[in-house]
Amino acid sequence: MQKISIYTENINLSQLLKWANITNSGGEAKTFIREGKIKVNGEVVKSPGKKIFPGDVIEFADTEKKYLVEGE
């Protein structure tokens, strides 16, 4: 599991995916999210504005790619 550090209290899911270079753009991040391809803490999320906090686990559905969000 890869770790992603954030330096704010929280971050929107789409912003996190772009900021951590998991997706190539914010538009691509939003598309993946709206298509149900992203899970947060094991549950599919379809809202790009979902708030992500340290301790959350992000994963791509149907893959083994997982990311742990850490605070500063």
Image (tube, rainbow, N blue to C red):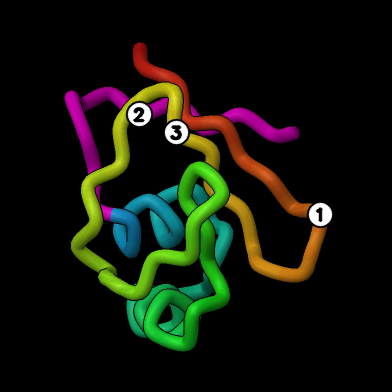
Q: Nearer the viewer, residue 5 or 66?
A: 66
68 versus 50 height, above or below: above
- Does label 1 or label 3 sit earlier along the sequence? 3
Which marked residue is nearer to the observer: mark 2 or mark 3? 3
State the extent of the magenta-drawn residues as a range.
1-12
Q: What residue sits 75% from the left and 53% below the top?
A: 65
Drawn side of residue 32 relative to residue 53, left or right: right
Tell me the crowding category of disc 1: few under 14, some 14 to 19, or many 20 or more residues within 10 angstroms, Cα based.
Answer: few
Reply yes or no: does residue 62 show up in magenta.
Answer: no
Element at label 3: loop
Amino acid bearing label 1: Glu
Amino acid bearing label 2: Ile
Measure the C-alpha gap from mark 2 to mark 3: 11 Å
> Toward which corner of the image does residue 5 lie, by quadrant?
top left
**Residue at the spot of label 3:** 56
Element at label 2: loop
Q: What residue sits 64% from the left and 63% below the top?
A: 60
In the rendered image, residue 35, in percent from the top left (x then y), is placed at 47, 87
In the rendered image, residue 52, in percent from the top left (x then y), is placed at 30, 41
Drawn side of residue 15 relative to residue 17, left or right: left
Measure the C-alpha gap from mark 1 to mark 2: 22 Å
Quadrant, the C terminus: top left
In the rendered image, residue 55, in percent from the top left (x then y), is placed at 44, 23
**Residue at the spot of label 2:** 6
